[in-house]
């Protein structure tokens, strides 16, 4: 049973306050920089899933003093099953926004405000870039279940790899929280990958390509953005391996441990290769990492 987000936000604030009271001496400026970086990404995911599920962005009380409403927000045309997925992930991402804002405020700092987020035309721009052409029918993340799942795939693996990289950047008081956030993102990514694997051979109208091919194109786009595409160290992977087997965990090495991304690589992905801004963040992220 899901706990009301407003209640859990207050509880999390108390928990974080207690933790920081014990570990305040260990806190560093880098911790807050990383938490604010993560908050930007959570703003993106929370708004996308909230819009897809309900047609509304997250509540403006969570945007911060100078927060900006996202563009392209609309309620997705989903079946009951897909809407349940959107609702569930939306609630988790909203809880992450509340959690990070509470943690930053508990450290006597001000969370970054929600930047301008494009969750409309940025998806069609990503699809065009993935296929290296202007698609005759713009990609609409809200049109149906399949396109919604494909849009979600753009984000979910990025969230896991971003938190995996961030674990090495935060000090002890924040390691547990950062690891926990990564765990939630990994659950989300695994769920989306499973849903896509189940329809891997289905052709996607009106693009004339199977789901697996579109997923691979998105994966290649992310690898191009983070600078590893076509190299021996290419990290990103689709849902079907070259040997035809399903790929639930994108782990380039034999240890089955997902790869990580540096903050700059994450920026390159969410900016769709733009320099300092673009893609899902037209004006860039807020905070020191941008």
Image (tube, rainbow, N blue to C red):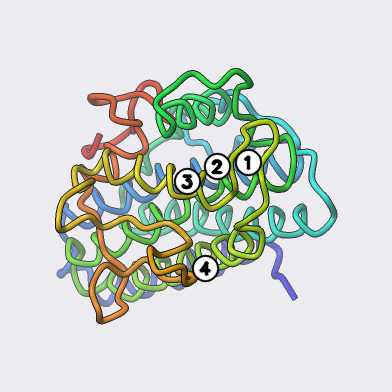
Per the image, label 4 sits on a secondary structure element best described as: helix
List the residue tagged with mark 4.
190
Q: Is disc 3 surrounded by few (<14), some (14 to 19) or many (20+) residues within 10 Å? A: many
Vertical order, 74 against 231 (above or below): above
Contact (CB < 8 A) between labels 4 and 2? Answer: no
| Residue 154, numbered label | 3
Q: Which residue is mark 2?
A: 62
Q: Residues within 10 Å of mark 4 (few under 14, many from 20)?
A: some
Q: Earlier in the sequence, mark 4 or mark 2?
A: 2
Of marks 4 and 1, which one's residue comes earlier in the chain? 1
Closer mark to the observer between disc 4 and disc 1: 4
Q: Earlier in the sequence, mark 2 or mark 3?
A: 2
Q: Earlier in the sequence, mark 3 or mark 4?
A: 3
Residue that protrudes farthest toward the front in the picture: 243
Which is more foreground, mark 3 or mark 1? 3
Mark 2 vs mark 1: in front: 1
Characterize the local packing of mark 2: few (<14), some (14-19) or many (20 or more) Cα atoms within 10 angstroms.
some
Q: Residue furthest bottom?
A: 255
Q: Quadrant of the C terminus?
A: top left
Residue carrying label 1:
58
User: How far is mark 2 from mark 3, CA to CA?
Assistant: 24 Å
Look at the numbered discs 3 and 4 and tell me whether their residues touch, using CB distance below 8 Å: no
Residue 279 place in picture, x, y as percent: 40, 27
Residue 87: name its quadrant: bottom right
Is 122 rendered above or below residue 11? above
């Amino acid at each position: 049973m899901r706990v009301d987000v407003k209640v859990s936000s207050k509880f999390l604030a108390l928990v974080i306050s207690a933790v920081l009271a014990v570990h305040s001496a260990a806190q560093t400026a880098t911790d807050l920089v990383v938490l604010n970086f993560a908050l930007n990404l959570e703003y993106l995911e929370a708004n996308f899933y909230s819009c897809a599920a309900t047609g509304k962005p997250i509540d403006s009380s969570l945007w911060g003093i100078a927060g900006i409403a996202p563009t392209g927000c609309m309620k997705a045309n989903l079946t009951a099953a897909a809407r349940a997925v959107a609702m569930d992930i939306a609630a988790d991402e909203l809880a992450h926004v509340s959690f990070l804002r509470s943690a930053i405020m508990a450290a006597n700092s001000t969370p970054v405000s929600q930047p301008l987020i494009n969750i409309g035309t940025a998806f069609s721009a990503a699809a065009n870039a993935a296929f290296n052409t202007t698609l005759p029918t713009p990609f609409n993340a809200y049109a149906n279940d399949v396109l919604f799942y494909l849009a979600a795939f753009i984000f979910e693996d990025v969230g896991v790899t971003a938190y995996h990289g961030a674990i090495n950047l935060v000090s002890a008081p924040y390691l547990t929280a950062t690891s926990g956030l990564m765990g939630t993102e990994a659950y989300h990514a695994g769920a989306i990958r499973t849903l896509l694997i189940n329809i891997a051979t289905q052709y996607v109208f009106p693009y004339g390509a199977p789901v697996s091919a579109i997923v691979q194109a998105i994966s290649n786009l992310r690898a191009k953005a983070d600078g590893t595409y076509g190299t021996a160290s290419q990290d990103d992977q689709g849902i079907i391996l070259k040997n035809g087997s399903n790929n639930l965990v994108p782990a380039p090495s034999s240890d089955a441990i997902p790869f990580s991304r540096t903050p700059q690589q994450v920026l390159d992905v969410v900016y769709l290769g733009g320099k300092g801004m673009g893609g899902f963040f037209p004006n860039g992220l807020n905070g020191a990492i941008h």
